[in-house]
Image (tube, helix red, strand yellow):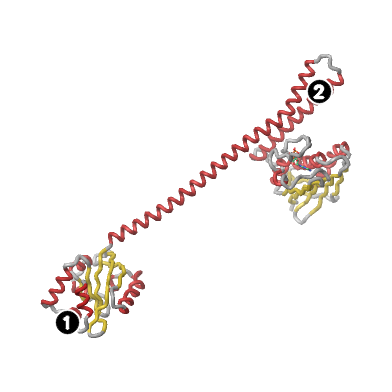
Amino acid sequence: MSGSSEIFQNNNNPAVDFFLQQPDKSEYENLISSFFDASDDLVFILDKNGYFHFVNQSGLNDLGYSLDELRGKHFFSITNPEEKVKLSNAFQRILQFEGLVYFDCKLTSKLGNVITYDISAKALFGRGSINGMLSVAKNITKQHLLKERYTEILVKYTETERLLSIERNRLRQRKSVLEELNRLKSEFVSNISHEMRTPLASIIGFSETISSDPEMPVGMRKEFNEIIHSEGKRLAKLINDILDISKLESGEIELQRKEIDLVSVIKNAVHHADALASEKNITLRLTVEDQEVKIIGDEERLTQVFNCLLSNAIKFTKSGGRVTVMGQSLYKEYEIIISDTGIGIAQKDLPHIFEKFYRVSKYGNEIPGAGLGLVFSKQVIDLHKGLITVESEEDKGSTFVIKLPKRN
Ligand code: ADP
């Protein structure tokens, strides 16, 4: 093509005049036409207004038009309207630039088939001005379709990869959740066995001693029997606590909700703890308003919560200390504050004390308990749509705050 482009660049070139101004057949035109027809590509010439002036035989075969039909057509009339901006820019470059300009473009054949071409084009000059445009266009429809298919497959592949990686992560997470559950289960079983072993050892030990010594003094036998009885009760309490927690957790037992007076529930719990406090020489003080505070709740479960918090406060406070219970009405809630001047809880333990079997290990702290009371209390308060929080300082004391929604 380089020989022909030289011909077309030449001002006052007879070939240009011939092609653009004298459409009549002549030997020279036949020669040039045959030259272009020898190409498998679409070779076409547009006049300076963008109308087809010449199209080679291969191009006519591709597009399904005769040369006469195409001569009356504007180039844009067989292009894809969506490509108009892109093509206008390419034409602009052809007009401004003397060399070859490359672009791809979709042309619609007479039968409506869309053919994608890779075009190289340049302006034709005749008598000093642009006379038209010569283009050689390679049919790349197959490659284009393959490329589109490839892109489609690549998008699908990327999407599948993404979904697979999400699924892989999900499985990994599930595996770690299952491993954690398994760990918790083993921990739970080991804790429970440990908690049961102590009272069981006492029960077995003392009952064996009683039966192996028929001569045992009545007083000692009575004392051993009392130990067996209280250890048995401890065991029963532990089993009940575990059952309560698991039933509440699984939703097997629901709260028995009814309208109750929270103030009297608190007063009763404090009254109940009075004996325990005096036994340990601990001052137990209650400050609540005189009027009733109505809430919708489960009286029995709430009583268990206050009993647990009060017995903890007394259990972890030394003789001569103080336990204070205060109730006050807030805007939509009732707040109960249970404070003690006891041993307190270290900051590192505070976030864990509502976890099952968590007991603060403190040197010399032999106070019994399975570490389930606070778990149960939190569950009950949560089920009442309330809130339980704790603040504490070692050797200064602890303050548990419960907020429960009041009846509207
Ligand atoms: P436990 O039956 O062992 O008392 P809880 O769930 O009631 O179990 O309490 C868990 C742990 O939290 C206790 O073992 C204790 O270490 C700590 N704790 C709870 N209440 C108090 C308190 N008022 N003062 C100090 N420590 C407390």
| Foreground residue among 373 and 334 | 373
| Foreground residue among 261 and 283 | 283
Q: Is residue 252 visible?
A: yes
Count up the numbered dots. 2
Where is residue 348? Give x, y as percent. 72, 46
Q: Which residue is mark 1?
A: 14
Ligand 1 within 8 Å, label 1 CB: no
Q: Residues within 10 Å of mark 2 (few under 14, many from 20)?
A: some
Amino acid type, mark 1:
Pro
The residue lying furthest to the left in this view is 27
Label 2 sits on a secondary structure element that is helix
Q: Is residue 261 visible?
A: no
Q: Quadrant of the N terminus?
A: bottom left
Pointers 2 and 1 in contact (CB under 8 A)?
Answer: no
Q: Is residue 156 above or below residue 319?
A: below
Label 2 vs 1, first from the N-terminus: 1
Give residue 76's mark.
Answer: none
Where is residue 207? Give x, y as percent. 77, 20
Depth-wise, is mark 2 or mark 1 nearer the camera? 1
Amino acid type, mark 2:
Asn
Image point 74% across, 22% down: which residue? 204
252 left or right, relative to 209: left
Examine the image and state in which quarter residue 332 appears: bottom right
Where is residue 284? Give x, y as percent. 86, 43
Q: Residues within 10 Å of mark 1 (few under 14, many from 20)?
A: some
318 left or right, relative to 233: right
Quadrant of the image where one finds ligand 1: top right
Q: Which residue is mark 2?
A: 225
Image point 14% across, 79% down: which residue? 24
| Foreground residue among 82 and 143 | 143
